[in-house]
Image (cartoon, rainbow, N blue to C red):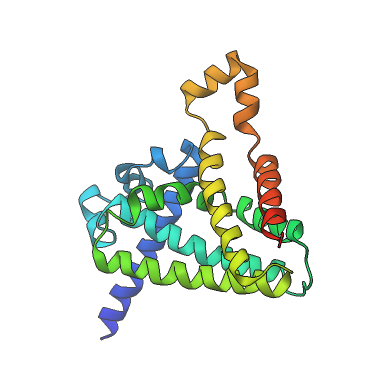
């Protein structure tokens, strides 16, 4: 029994090592689209074939990071609005932007989850992700509704807009080397693409103000 406990503890520790390596590599290599399992396993000194003991695929590993991202966002937003009441629509939008942009990996993953990650894992893993992400989403919605003047239904619409805008704007504001070179040649195009946080703030504030109308 003691040996099994130690074995389980070692497996959990190695799982965390793999997730930490994936986070670091994604930040260093320009996002999760450039991440490979081979690079992750090499970073932790693990043979590529051994990774299957911990994650069935790169998609499963990244989905784990996305699931944790939802929980971390929920906790950050709850702390950010702990004593807030009566916030106007723009302030609610700002709370979303502030807590989202503080989590670059999560912003990046928001594009990939519906595109490939949740559909390319086993059904039980997908079920667990859906259950936990929806629970975090509902807690975020409740926190925003309690802190501001938007109705619960309109808060949910605002969260949907925040997720959609973040998923798109994050990608265009973190271009590939080819696009970065193109933007250097045509600064006007680059200016339109690269102002992630200011543009997200403007668009989400405008959306919140629109949702506040009768």
Residue drawn at point x = 36 percent, y = 62 percent: 15
The N terminus - image quarter: bottom left
Quarter occupied by residue 39: top left
The C terminus - image quarter: bottom right
Foreground: 21 or 62?
A: 62
Q: Which residue appears farthest toward the left when viewing the image?
A: 49
Count of marks placed on residues: 0
Residue drawn at point x = 70 percent, y = 49 percent: 206
Q: Is residue 190 above or below residue 205?
A: above
Foreground: 61 or 195?
A: 195
Foreground: 171 or 204?
A: 204
Q: Is residue 132 above or below residue 18?
A: below
Residue drawn at point x = 45 percent, y = 43 percent: 25
Residue 170 place in picture, x, y as percent: 55, 41
Quarter occupied by residue 51: bottom left
Quarter occupied by residue 42: top left
């Amino acid at each position: 029994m003691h040996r099994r406990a130690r074995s389980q503890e070692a497996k959990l520790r190695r799982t965390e090592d793999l997730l930490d390596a994936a986070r670091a590599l994604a930040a260093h290599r320009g996002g999760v689209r450039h991440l490979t399992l081979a690079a992750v396993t090499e970073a932790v000194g693990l043979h590529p074939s051994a990774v299957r003991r911990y994650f069935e695929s790169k998609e499963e590993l990244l989905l784990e990071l996305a699931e944790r991202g939802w929980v971390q966002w929920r906790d950050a937003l709850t702390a950010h609005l702990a004593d807030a009441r009566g916030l106007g629509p723009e302030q609610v939008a700002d709370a979303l932007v502030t807590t989202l942009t503080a989590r670059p990996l999560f912003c990046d993953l928001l594009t990939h989850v519906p595109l490939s990650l949740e559909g390319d894992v086993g059904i039980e893993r997908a079920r667990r992700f859906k259950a936990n992400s929806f629970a975090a989403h509902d807690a975020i919605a409740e926190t925003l509704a309690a802190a501001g003047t938007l109705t619960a239904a309109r808060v949910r619409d605002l969260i949907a807009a925040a997720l959609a805008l973040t998923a798109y704007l994050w990608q265009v504001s973190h271009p590939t080397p080819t696009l970065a070179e193109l933007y250097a040649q045509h600064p006007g195009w680059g200016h339109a693409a690269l102002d992630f946080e200011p543009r997200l703030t403007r668009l989400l504030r405008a959306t919140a103000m629109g949702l506040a109308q009768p």
